[in-house]
Amino acid sequence: MNAREPIHLTVNQNILEMEYAVRGPIPRRAAELRQQGRETILCNIGNPQALGQKPITYYRQVLSLVEDPAKIDRERALEKRWKTDGGPPAGLGDIERVSEHVLKVSEQFLSNMKSGLGAYSESNGPLFIREAIARFIDKRDGVDTTHGSPSNPDGIFVTNGASEGAKYVIDLLIADPKDGIMIPIPQYPLYSATIKKSGGTQVNYYPDEDSGWVLNRSILEEALSAARRDGIRVKGLVVIHPGNPTGAILGAETIREIIDFARDNEIVLIADEVYQENTYGATFTSFAKVLGREEVPLFSLHSISKGFYGECGHRGGYLEVRNPPKAAGTPLSFTEILLKQASVCLCPNTAGQLLMYLVVNPPEEGSEPYRLFAQEKQTILTDLWDKATLIREGFKHMDQVECFGRTGAMYLFPRLNKLPVGTTDFDYCMNLLETTGLCTVNGSGFGQKEGTHHLRIAFLPPKKLIERVLPRWIEFHNAYVNR
Amino acid sequence: MNAREPIHLTVNQNILEMEYAVRGPIPRRAAELRQQGRETILCNIGNPQALGQKPITYYRQVLSLVEDPAKIDRERALEKRWKTDGGPPAGLGDIERVSEHVLKVSEQFLSNMKSGLGAYSESNGPLFIREAIARFIDKRDGVDTTHGSPSNPDGIFVTNGASEGAKYVIDLLIADPKDGIMIPIPQYPLYSATIKKSGGTQVNYYPDEDSGWVLNRSILEEALSAARRDGIRVKGLVVIHPGNPTGAILGAETIREIIDFARDNEIVLIADEVYQENTYGATFTSFAKVLGREEVPLFSLHSISKGFYGECGHRGGYLEVRNPPKAAGTPLSFTEILLKQASVCLCPNTAGQLLMYLVVNPPEEGSEPYRLFAQEKQTILTDLWDKATLIREGFKHMDQVECFGRTGAMYLFPRLNKLPVGTTDFDYCMNLLETTGLCTVNGSGFGQKEGTHHLRIAFLPPKKLIERVLPRWIEFHNAYVNR
């Protein structure tokens, strides 16, 4: 066998140029260190269960039964013995029952999804799941016969995480390299990567950091004017709300301004609302709620990965379409084209679909699993807030670090006002990793105003771990920036 | 509120032009009929569990426990009582135990995937799953220290179904509209859709139907020459093996010819081997096995959706890369670029990953779950063969229907030699659906030689249902073609 020179091929330039820092060089270096036996703390990504957050018991109990329906019969048989004996049968002692409620919900799910989780579903997800999502949205937004506009299950797509929905929309909107999508700076790199991959143009807008990442119409107008001067046709505006990585939570008035801007400029809105539960006491107002009956195109995203659910690995989410634009040059509606895109993947994974269904259908107050559910939810959210607060306190002991705005989402995005000459936030994060094992991501991975430096940290590790690593970070910081 | 004219936007032309017949107008009409209360039999797609095939017990038992690890402790406690009592505790009667083997495999999986299924995994899947896949491939292909070339876990990507892996490769190979990918006609429309979406050129080659869909080098050379005359730079060659929709199973000599063709023309091979278990007594020879140590780029695909597993809804699969080509204009290797693509989706869904792991790690002969596992596998595969045979018999009673080649995969692709003047196989399939409720897909949805007509039927419905609908199909057929 003679060794051959491997063949050389040109490859898709957009994929080559695409960047995705949260899985980039710093996390890759962390993986190497881990393989060498070093302790690393993975704060590069919002992956709560990887850092010890427990799944919500109720979700997993239902999922477990639906995956193996024979277990439901077995539980029913066990139940019967329990009941007959007025307690666990002799010898079973303290072994716990599976709650009647959990059994019923599992049976109900299977009666709606008759082939269970092993069959392809409809490409947009089965109607009963889309209906449950629509009810959830209406309830969340206080929609009734006199207020707001009800969500339409036909405009809902269950997806493999929110990322998939965002990609469908952006892929479809980009018809030409001069087509632009506005994204906030800093942003979650899914957006920059997807725009790049689709061959379109990224149009940056800059929420005002020093006033707590405030966003207003004039910021958007400025970005739009600049893009138009460059011959870019802006078609979509992405708002991440609450902000990733900034945590910023928008009020109804700001959302109103954004909607007006979109309407007046014939731009569709893409509202990434995956952190809607991560507001820590602040009110979350959805874009759909402020939109009401106004006919501005809105694509909203939600996910099972964030909130208090944290089911990242199961890849579940949804995309809700309101007032779809008319697609030029085709008899198909925008929603029909989206459905065609979804068809090529056949269907979103069914375990993720079930979890999405459970997220929009939490156990009702007073039901058997409610108490534990509510307690787990509360613990997780309180914990997240406490951990964010702990880290924010740490910043006060770091030379010239400022962190603006209220805590939201799962991240802090502090500004590093002082760095050694000639170094960047990438160097800082890499050195922080090497010195302390703490894996964060450089601000440039999310985009930032020219000349500023940041990092993003997910406030997810257990408190004790944060308490242990924070002093080392402070020490590293003050030595590094003053070296 | 004044009703506004919806905004008009141009959209991505490639997405508009993309077609996906297996979820196209005929299945959509079937959905309408079902909503009207009509019985429909969904043979448009290989979706076994939707047609009553039961999941493999072993897979679901493990999946159920891994989804809810608290159940493992509970089972361990129950086990203990069982053992102490030398049988089920008083009152538990015939309630079945979960086997020790299933408990151990679940525990082992969780000891490898410490955060369970709720965390994002590595974007290509965790190393232990990729290693298990590599061992499976080597065992299947008889690789040892003297024969063949071992599979490299670093070249393996766990994916959301095989479709995702195919898309990564094709998306990356298309750098220019003149870049071409060769696909068989007929083909599975994932390929035509993905090439269209990527903006490349589809290059057709035509296995010889009348001799049983035979493929040879001269068929490939002919297609390549024609493409080159049109200025197309052919970069990839897709082979679906066993064939979808043809069922054709290739021998080692044919695969050798295909590899030689690819090597001599510097074309990468994409081997879709998702039906490798669906050969019904014929030997499956993988492209990797015939390739051996020869350094021709090969991308192989496998899936949890087909075979006897049929876990379509869970969306699991893998892509194995051998001898990756060198990507021009970048220091990154081809595999590193694929990993970047996978990163943007974060990770394949974890339930699908677990099932892929179980598919490549079946219970060993002699182990506790083996007997039931082997029996379920045998029953499913025998049943599929019987059902295919039943339908093939039916063709003999249909005027001028011919079905070539041996049965493979999950489909029959009969040729309709007689149709009423001016009608197409699309009309035939639509009328067949309206008359009998049987949902098939027109041959033109897969591609076929000019002037021929076919349909694809998945041989998946229960035998009784086939026996019931087949006479109605025969009756419809003979009336329709002779009308």
Image: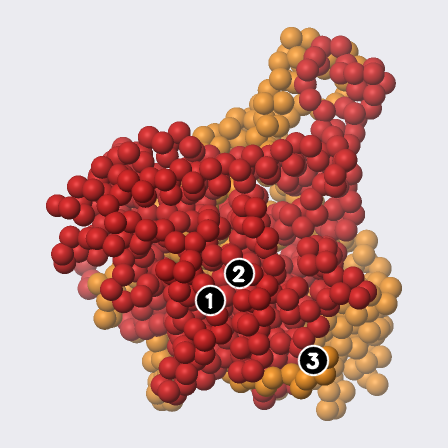
Chain colours: A orange, B red
Q: Residue at x 62, y 28 (%)?
A: A71
In the image, which disc is placed on residue A425?
3
Q: Which chain is disc 1 placed on?
A: B
Q: Name the residue carrying label 1.
A: B215
In depth, the one of B312 and A132 nearer the eye is B312
Q: Name the residue carrying label 2.
A: B250
In depth, the one of A373 and A19 nearer the eye is A19
Residues marked 1 and 2 touching at CB (< 8 Å): yes
Q: Residue at x 79, y 74 (%)?
A: A432
Left/right of residue A179 with respect to residue A435 in the rendered view: left
Q: Which chain is disc 3 placed on?
A: A
Q: State which quadrant residue B209 falls in.
A: bottom left
Q: From what the image shows, is residue B73 above or below residue A302? A: above
- The disc labelled 1 sits on which kind of residue? Leu
Spot occupied by residue B31 in the image (x, y as percentages of width and height): 30, 43
Q: Are marks 2 and 3 on the same chain?
A: no
Name the secondary structure under disc 2: loop
Q: State which quadrant residue B75 falls in.
A: top right
